Image: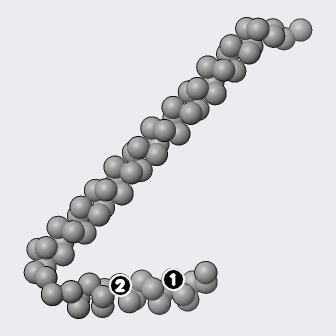
């Protein structure tokens, strides 16, 4: 996807939001909730990734004890 295509999509978004027949406060609330959900999803993804790294580290320590370096 080129930069021009991304630019076209991002220039269309405000027009789409402007066509929605809803008060500005409702549009802002929806945008805020969308950002909040993305932040929560990013936090969950970070915790899952950190947990996986912790699990791999624990396995590495077990393997180190089982097979010490010469």
Q: How many marks?
A: 2
Quadrant position of residue 20: bottom left
33 on left or right of 39 = left
* Distance Cα–Cα, label 2 vs label 1: 11 Å
- Residue at the image point whose x is 30% and y is 88% from the top: 16
- Residue at the image point whose x is 17% and y is 67% from the top: 29
The location of residue 46, given as percent across then percent down, is 46, 42
Q: Earlier in the sequence, mark 2 or mark 1?
A: 1
The location of residue 54, given as percent across then percent down, is 56, 27
Residue 52 vertical placement versus 44 (above, below): above
Quadrant position of residue 24: bottom left
Callout 1 environment at 10 Å: few (<14), some (14 to 19), or many (20+)? few
Callout 2 environment at 10 Å: few (<14), some (14 to 19), or many (20+)? few
The location of residue 43, given as percent across then percent down, is 39, 45
Residue 6 vertical placement versus 70 (above, below): below
- Residue at the image point whose x is 21% and y is 68% from the top: 30
The location of residue 48, given as percent across then percent down, is 48, 38
Residue 60 vertical placement versus 48 (above, below): above
State the quadrant of the N terminus: bottom right
Residue furthest to the right: 70
13 on left or right of 9 = left
44 on left or right of 34 = right
The disc label shown at residue 13, or none? 2
Residue 23 vertical placement versus 49 (above, below): below
Q: Are marks 2 and 1 in contact (CB under 8 Å)?
A: no
- Residue at the image point whose x is 29% and y is 63% from the top: 34
14 on left or right of 64 = left
State the quadrant of the C terminus: top right
Q: Secondary structure at mark 2?
A: helix
Give the colouring mode of the picture: one colour
The disc label shown at residue 6, or none? 1
């Amino acid at each position: 996807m080129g930069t021009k295509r991304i630019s076209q999509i991002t220039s269309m978004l405000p027009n789409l939001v402007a066509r929605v027949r809803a008060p500005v406060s409702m549009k802002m609330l929806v945008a805020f909730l969308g950002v909040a959900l993305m932040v929560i999803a990013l936090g969950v993804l970070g915790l899952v990734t950190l947990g996986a790294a912790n699990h791999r580290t624990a396995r590495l320590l077990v393997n180190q004890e089982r097979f010490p370096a010469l």
